[in-house]
């Protein structure tokens, strides 16, 4: 350890400030407090995230703080990896069968690097999780790691901290999961059929594996889709029918949206016979890489067409170079912290989709990006014209407080507040859901307070906008 803070050797209190993230100016802070207080207890609407529905279906106690707060959270593991910890040391298994660290060892590694999270959004989320959800009153450190681990193991065994009890205490009104089209959705079915369960958990159709014709897994994915749908996917028309059938299955189990983690928002709309020939050449392995990319764009365009027919909202999460470090991907697989943002262009890329569906009565899309340079230049003007296009909240690397503020500054003057889709927590860390929503509420309260102080709007209007950002807008954008 590089010995930066005294907290590594002392029992430092953990007490998040009640005015955190609110404006510094006293007049604005007073307004922001009132605005924040008006929404702080609203139910949480979580239209996009990665919590496993099996967690709630089984309702088993969490076993330890490492597997709850560290190992599943790539925000945490990626920064610890940057400071020299291997992913094995953080509890992630690899394809070589190397033993992973035990939970207590993972927790010690996390605590010894606690000071490295200073200034990050992750730090304040975790502080909120520890203090507000788990009742911890002193900060993690190398010296306190074992004491804190034992305290949390005891607490996690209590009924009040089981998944379903937490779901209720978080005041979650609806939670959308992210699911593979071949998933049988048995956990969603189990929750829906359980008379003791009253929460709303809906699936989201995430077809990336089946649309990415450049992926090494594509051929095998089509075979899995055929098995799940009962429809032969050896032809282009068969693949399209299989995807449509699985979308219907998801809709029957409560889905309101699809989600697409495409590298770019570009889509193609080829004639069926041309698309069929292209599919055949890619399926046979005789196509060029560019032809495979064209087929991927075509399948994304087909997804837009399907949304115009079945009404599932098309969420586009674009702008990430997936699996940037090939050795890590080979050893540990995807979603292990090494996806990196890239630039995206939207004005021309989305034009083919919007020419077809930009005013379509059933079509609706929510667009996210990791490239904040396009917020004011491209996305806000697009959302300020097309009634079917909503702007997704700052996402992933941009879901930090100052980036959220930049988003509001960049888009509001062109598109207003009501062409945005509220907030998505986009998390695998179950206990971070309330913390992340609270962060967004504080940031938006501060932004609106500045507009009130500048006499751009009344405090009454600001309170109504803040309520909409946390309730009406996510419901409308994701058809919840």
Image (spheres, grey):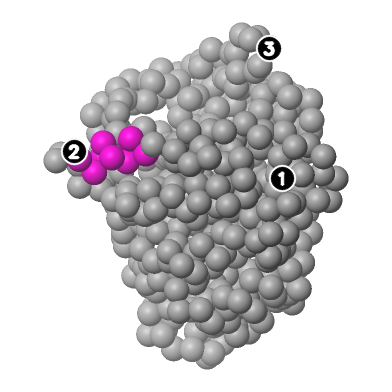
Return the residue nearer the eye: 20 or 252. 252
- In percent of width and height, residue 194 lies at 18, 38
Q: Earlier in the sequence, mark 1 or mark 3?
A: 3
Looking at the figure, which quarter contains the N terminus? Answer: top right
Q: Is residue 136 visible?
A: yes
Q: Residues within 10 Å of mark 3 (few under 14, many from 20)?
A: few
Q: Residue at x 55, y 47 (%)?
A: 238
Q: Which residue is mark 2?
A: 194
Q: Residue at x 54, y 82 (%)?
A: 359
Q: Which residue is mark 3?
A: 96
Residue 459 picture quarter: bottom left
The stretch in magenta equals 185-194
Q: CA distance from mark 1 to mark 2?
A: 45 Å
In this rendering, the answer to whether 325 lies above or below 91 is below
User: Is label 1 in a helix, a strand or a loop?
Assistant: helix
Q: Residue at x 76, y 62 (%)?
A: 344
Looking at the figure, which quarter contains the C terminus? Answer: bottom left
Q: Residue at x 28, y 50 (%)?
A: 200
In this rendering, the answer to whether 344 lies above or below 430 is below
Return the residue nearer the eye: 399 or 138. 399
Q: Which residue is mark 1?
A: 280
Return the residue nearer the eye: 331 or 241. 241
């Amino acid at each position: 350890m590089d010995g930066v803070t005294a907290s590594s050797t002392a029992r430092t209190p953990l007490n998040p400030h009640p005015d955190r993230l609110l404006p510094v100016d006293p007049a604005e802070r007073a307004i922001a407090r009132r605005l924040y207080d008006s929404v702080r207890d609203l139910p949480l609407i979580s239209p996009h995230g990665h919590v496993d529905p099996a967690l709630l279906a089984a309702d088993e106690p969490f076993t330890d703080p490492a597997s709850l707060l560290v190992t599943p959270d790539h925000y945490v593991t990626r920064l610890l990896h940057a400071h020299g910890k291997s992913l094995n040391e953080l509890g992630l298994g690899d394809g070589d069968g190397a033993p992973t660290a035990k939970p207590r060892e993972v927790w010690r590694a996390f605590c010894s690097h606690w000071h490295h999270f200073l200034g990050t959004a992750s730090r304040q989320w975790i502080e909120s999780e520890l203090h507000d959800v788990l009742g911890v009153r002193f900060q993690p450190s190398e010296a306190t790691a074992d004491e804190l681990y034992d305290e949390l193991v005891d607490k996690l065994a209590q009924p009040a901290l089981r998944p379903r009890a937490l779901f209720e205490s978080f005041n979650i009104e609806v939670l959308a999961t992210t699911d593979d089209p071949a998933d049988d959705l048995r956990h969603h079915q189990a929750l829906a059929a359980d008379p003791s369960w009253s929460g709303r958990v809906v699936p989201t159709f995430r077809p990336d594996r089946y649309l990415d014709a450049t992926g090494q897994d594509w051929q095998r994915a089509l075979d899995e889709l055929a098995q799940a749908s009962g429809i032969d996917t050896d032809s282009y028309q068969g693949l399209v029918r299989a995807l449509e059938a699985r979308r219907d299955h998801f809709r029957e189990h409560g889905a309101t949206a699809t989600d697409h983690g495409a590298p770019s928002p570009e889509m193609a709309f080829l004639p069926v016979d041309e698309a069929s020939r292209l599919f055949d050449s890619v399926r046979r392995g005789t196509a060029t890489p560019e032809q495979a990319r064209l087929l991927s764009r075509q399948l994304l365009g087909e997804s837009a067409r399907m949304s115009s027919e079945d009404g599932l909202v098309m969420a586009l999460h674009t702008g990430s170079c997936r699996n940037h470090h090939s050795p890590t991907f080979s050893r540990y697989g995807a979603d292990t912290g090494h996806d990196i943002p890239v630039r995206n262009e939207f004005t021309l890329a989305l034009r083919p989709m919007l020419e077809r569906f930009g005013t379509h009565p059933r079509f609706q899309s929510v667009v996210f990006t990791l490239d904040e340079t396009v917020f004011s230049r491209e996305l806000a003007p697009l959302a300020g014209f097309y009634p079917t296009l909503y702007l997704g909240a700052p996402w992933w690397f941009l879901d930090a407080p100052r980036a959220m503020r930049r988003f509001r500054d960049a888009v509001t003057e062109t598109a207003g507040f009501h062409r945005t889709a509220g907030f998505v927590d986009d998390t695998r860390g179950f206990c971070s859901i309330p913390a992340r929503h609270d962060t967004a509420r504080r940031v938006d309260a501060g932004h609106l307070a500045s507009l009130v102080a500048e006499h751009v709007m009344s405090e009454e209007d600001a309170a109504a906008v803040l309520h909409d950002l946390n309730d009406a807008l996510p419901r409308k954008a994701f058809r919840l």
